[in-house]
Image: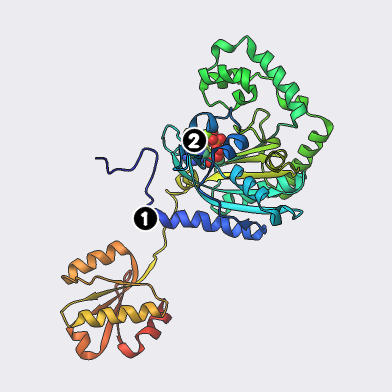
Amino acid sequence: MNYTKAPGIEDIFPDRIELWNHIIDTARTVFKEYNIKEIILPIMEFTEVFARGIGDETDIVSKEMFTFEDRGGRNLTLRPEGTASLVRAYCENGDYNRLASSKFFYCGPMFRAEKPQKGRLRQFNQFGVEFFGEDSAYNDFEIIAVMDTITKRLGITNYTLLINSIGKESERNIYVNELKKYYSDKIDKLCENCKRRLDKNALRILDCKEPGCNVIKKDAPVIKDFLDDESLKHHNELKGLLDNAGIKYVENPLLVRGLDYYCKTTFEFVTDSLGGQNTFAAGGRYNKLVEMFSGKPKPAVGFAAGIERIFLMLESSFKAETSLDIFIIHTGDKAKPKASLTAYELRNAGISVDFDPVGGSFKSQMKRVNREKCRFVIIISDDELEGNYATVRDAQTREEVKIGFDTLIASIKNML
Ligand code: ATP
Ligand code: MG
């Protein structure tokens, strides 16, 4: 019998929730500033949605999906990412895809059967944004600005925004041939995965993380030399917009994304503070995906960010705020019902309160107060009951005041 969690899956206990929510709340605030609307997508889809949407030859589809048959013999998969689901939903919903331009965000768990490591889980969480509408560099700029703003607002300074353009399919086909030529006499030095990729999808060799493949990559031909005027103009326009806004970036001519659907702009937010898993957000333009699902062309651009990786970057510097306003300590049997009622009334007045119904010694209740880190302690014992007042102690300074029960709520509200 095994009652532990499965590999690569984490419980997120309350001590992590404050930072967790802070990350998501910060993202939500920025999404609002950019008029990006939330969409809640299903956790599972027909396998076909991901197989077609992401591409059979990608790592995700070829080896990372949690796929199973439901009781009706249908083939389902736990979502490994959000874009394919969102495009499926967008195409299926007539009302939304009739709008000229639509901006969506999602947030939630994703599932990939990877080798678990720090910052690499089997169930992990992403927030992501997708814009459907035009093939405009302004949209690419906005998408990048959203993630850059979230990053800065979270106080992350140790990061680099990498950008590239991988052009259109026609340009890429010529480039991929050049790439195949370049790698053909180096095949022995490539990892097993890349040996396979060379034939099926050579572009993805550039996305390999193996040190050996990385070395050979350095002298590979770059896509930039194969872009036509239109793709170059798009890329230069994006760079101009980033420059105007003072958003710093580094051009990486070998940056391709591991998914099939990208074209033109690709970008990654990387840091060296995460050890091996150094990308915390990534995205790009994908003009053909909507057409693949619905037959109607609609250019799109988006990104996804890994919440666990952002969490790891912030956890050492984050100071959790005191979340509990009041802890009530009571001594003696008569004090207990008064403590319970006082807690009830304070809570109804919007104040956060806890008390220990078991009670116990003053000392043991104080220990709990210290663990909870509350702002004030209310002490109710026989003395207080007799005098019809509560003793209110500042948990930090330990200064105490006596406050009559009839004015307690109003006084506490003033003090908080
Ligand atoms: P990697 O190269 O690290 O495997 P990826 O290219 O597979 O990343 P994407 O599919 O672009 O990643 O996902 C976007 C972001 O989601 C990543 O930049 C990362 O922050 C996060 N992410 C992806 N896979 C995992 C995982 N297994 N565990 C935790 N976070 C992940
Ligand atoms: Mg991956």
Task: Of the two numbered discs 2 and 1 on the same chain, state the one appearing first in sequence.
Answer: 1
The residue where tag 2 is placed is 65
- Res 259 → quadrant: top right
Q: Nearer the viewer, residue 307 or 204?
A: 204
Judging from the image, what secondary structure is the residue with disc 2 in?
A: loop
- Residue 59's x, y, as percent? 54, 30
Query: Can residue 144 be seen in the rendering of this structure?
Result: yes
User: Mark 2: few, some, or many residues within 10 Å (few <14, many ≥20)?
Assistant: many
Residue type highlighted by circle 2? Met
Total marks drawn?
A: 2
> Mark 1, residues whose alpha carbon is within 10 Å: few (<14), some, or many (≥20)?
few
Q: Residue furthest front?
A: 72
Indicate the amino acid at tag 1. Answer: Asp
**Residue linked to disc 1:** 15
**Residue name at image x 63 percent, y 9 percent:** 185
Q: CA–CA distance between discs 2 and 1? A: 31 Å
Query: Which residue occupies 37% across, 55% down?
Result: 15
Where residue 283 appears, as percent x and y from the top left, is: 63, 40
Please identify, in this view, whether the residue under mark 2 or under mark 1 is nearer the observer: 2
